[in-house]
Image: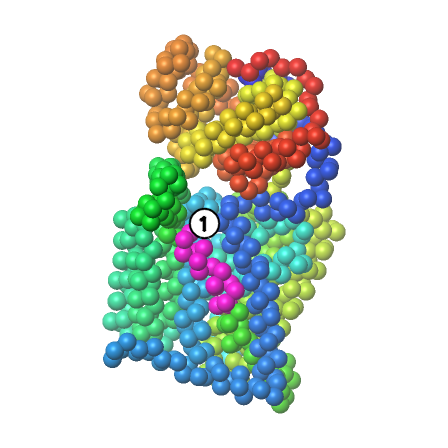
Amino acid sequence: MDGGATHARARMDRGAAHGAVVPSLGGVNRGWRDRSRPRARTVLHGQLSEPLRRFLGTESAGAALLLTATVVAVVWANSPWSAAYVALWETPVSLSAGDAGMTMDLGHWVNDALMTIFFFVIGLEVRRELSLGELTDRRRIVVPLVAGAAGLVVPALLYLAVNPSGEAARGWGVVIGSDTAFLLGALAVVGPRLSTQLRLFLLTMTVIDDILAVSVIGLVYSDDLDLGAIGLALLCLVALAALARRGVWQTSPYVVLVVLLWLATVRSGLHPSIAGMVAGLLVPATAPRRDVVEGAATLVRAFRQSPMPSVGRTAQRGIVRAISVNERLQSVLHPWASYVVVPVFALANAGVDLRGGMLGDALRSPVTWGVVLGLVVGKTVGITAGALGAVRLGLGRLPQGVGHGQVAGGAALSGIGFTVSLLITALAFDDERLRDEATVGVLLAAVLATGLGWLVFRLAAVLLGERTAELPRHLVAPVDPERDHIRGPGTAPLTLVEYLDFECPFCARATGVGRELREHFGDRLRYVVRHLPLPDVHPNAERAAMAAEAAGRQGQFWAMHDLLFTRQDRLHPEALVEYAAELGLQVDRFVEDLSDGGLAARIREDVAGAEASGARSTPTFFVVDRRHSGPYDAATLIRELEQVAGTVQADPAPVAEPR
C-alpha cells in the first residue's frame, strides 16, 4: 500500500542515506521462524546463483575422491607393488593421424593434457563470474585480489629464505597455489556450520590465486620456446575472441579451437595449463535473453503439438541456444574435472616412496620445511594481512557476514596447495630426490593447514563470536501496511514479498507467477513488492522505480507496475511520461515527482532493506519473513506457502485498500 511518512520510515531514511544496514523494526511470525531453525542447512547456499551453487557443490564432493586417490597413491607407492606404480605412469602412449603423431608417457598425458581441462574449467568459471556472477561488481574483486597476491608473495619469500640458492631455490613456485577442491572440502568439515559467504570469498581468492599460479607455470616453468608454435597459439586465441565477439552460440567451433590451441601450446614449450586458463576466459558467458527463451518455449510447444523428429531437433536447438556456450561447457566438463581429472592427477603425482630412509631424509630437508613454512605460515600470514590490510586502507570490504577471524581460518586452509603444488613440483625439480622431498612437504602442509584452520575457526567462534559466515536469511524490515505496496487483504495470513527490478526480464516473468499465486490463494495471500534496482546491469531500473512511485502518489502504483513490465524495452524518460498520460495521470505532477528526493529516499530504503536481508539479485522472494531459495516458479512457491499456511500468524493491523 501507499502510505504517509511514519516514524519507521524516518528511521530507515537515516540508515539508508548513510549506507547503513537497516535495523530490524521488530519480529513478525516468530513462531514460524523458530520452528524453521532446524532446517537451516537446507538453504545453506540459497543466496548464491544456481551456477555458483553447482560449482561449489561439485568442488566439495570432488574433494573426497581427491583424498581417496591421494591415500591410494601413497599406499601403492610404498607397497610391494610399487614398481608397478612407477611403470604405469612411465608407460608411453601415442596418438597419431597419418604421419602426424604425439607420444608422451602416461604421467605427462595426465599433467599436460588432463590438467589442461582442469584449468580450462577454472577459466570458464572465472569468465562466468566476471560476466554474470559475483565479480560483476568489480569492487568485490579488490580485497580477494590483494589477499591472493599477498598469499603468493609471502609464501615464496619464506620458501626462498630457507632455500636461497641452488636447484632447491627453483621450488619457490610450489608454495604459491591453493587447491580449491581440498580447501572447500576442508572448510565444510572444520569451518563454520553456515559459511556461504566465506566460501564465496575464498572461491574468489583462489580463482585469482589460480590465475597468478598458472601465469607463473607458463612463464617460469616452461621449456625451450618454439616461436612458430607460440604464434599459432596466439592465432587460436584471437579466433576464440572473434567467435565470442560475433556471438557464435554453437559449441563445436570453440572445442575445435581449444584443441588446436592445446596442441600448439604443447609444441611451443609453454606449459599447456596456461592455454587452458586463457581459453576458458575467452569463452563467453551471457545471461539468457528473454526473446530467445520465449522463442525456445514456443518451439517446445510446437513439438508438443507435432512430435515430429524435425520439429524436435528445432526445439532442441532453440533450448541449447538459450544457454550460453560457457555454461554448456561447464555443465559437461566440470564433473569430469572434479571427479576424474583431479583424482587421477593425485593418483599419478602423490605417490612418493617413503621407504629406505626417504621419510627421515625428507623431514630433515630444507626443501620439505621450506614448502611447509611457505604453505602453512606464508599463506596464513599473507592472505590474512592482505585481506585485512586492504579493508583497513579502504580499498574494499569483506563480504557481509564474514569476520576477521574467519578470514584467518580460511587463509590457514589455503595452505592446502596440493594440485597446483604437486604440478609445479614435477616441473621445478629434475632431481627426483628433491621432487620427493617437496611432495612430502606438500602432503604434510595439507595436514597441518587443516589442523591450523580448525583451531583458528574455533578461536574465532569462542573469542569473537564468529559462528556463522552467511548472508541474512530473514526479512529485516517487516511488512508495514502504512508504507508497503500490497496486493490482497492487508490481514491475509500468508505473505509473499518480492524485491524486483523493472528492467529485469525474470521479474517480468515472476509478475505472472504472482498473478497465479493470487489466483490460487485468493484472500489468504498478500503480495508485497519492494524495489531493488540494479543500475550496473539495468541502467533504466532506478528511473522506472521512480516512475512507479510517482504514479503511486496518484493512486496508480499497480497500474504503472504492470505497464512497466509490459514495456521493458522502453523505459527512457520520454516513454515514462507517455505511460503516465496513458494511465490518465496528471502529467505535470508526475514529472515533478520524478525528481522528488522523498521518492528517491524510499527506493534507497528498499535497497538498504534488501541488503540487510540478504537479497542480492532480482527477483528475490521472502515467504512470510524468510528468504526463498531455489526455483521461483508458481508450483514451487505454492508448495512453500502451503507448508507454512497453518503456522503463520496474521498481522492484525487494519489497512486501507491497496492502490
Q: Quadrant of residue 217?
A: bottom left
Which residue type does callout 1 highlight? Glu
Q: Is residue 317 left or right of residue 352?
A: left
How did the renderer colour the structure?
rainbow
Residue occupying image coordinates x 49% and y 49%: 51
Residue occupying image coordinates x 51% and y 50%: 52
Residue closest to the eye, 559 or 235: 559
Q: Is residue 433 left or right of residue 246?
A: right
**Quarter of the figure with the N terminus:** top right
Residue occupying image coordinates x 45% and y 32%: 509
Q: Is residue 28 above or below residue 177?
A: above
Whether residue 386 appears in magenta in the rendering, the answer is no
Q: Is residue 444 visible?
A: yes
* Label 1 environment density (alpha carbons within 10 Å; few <14, some 14–19, many ≥20): some
Q: Quadrant of residue 494?
A: top right
Q: Main secondary structure of the magenta part?
A: helix
Q: Position of residue 455 (x, y in %)?
A: 70, 60
Give the extent of the magenta segment: 327-342
Q: Position of residue 65 (x, y in %)?
A: 57, 67
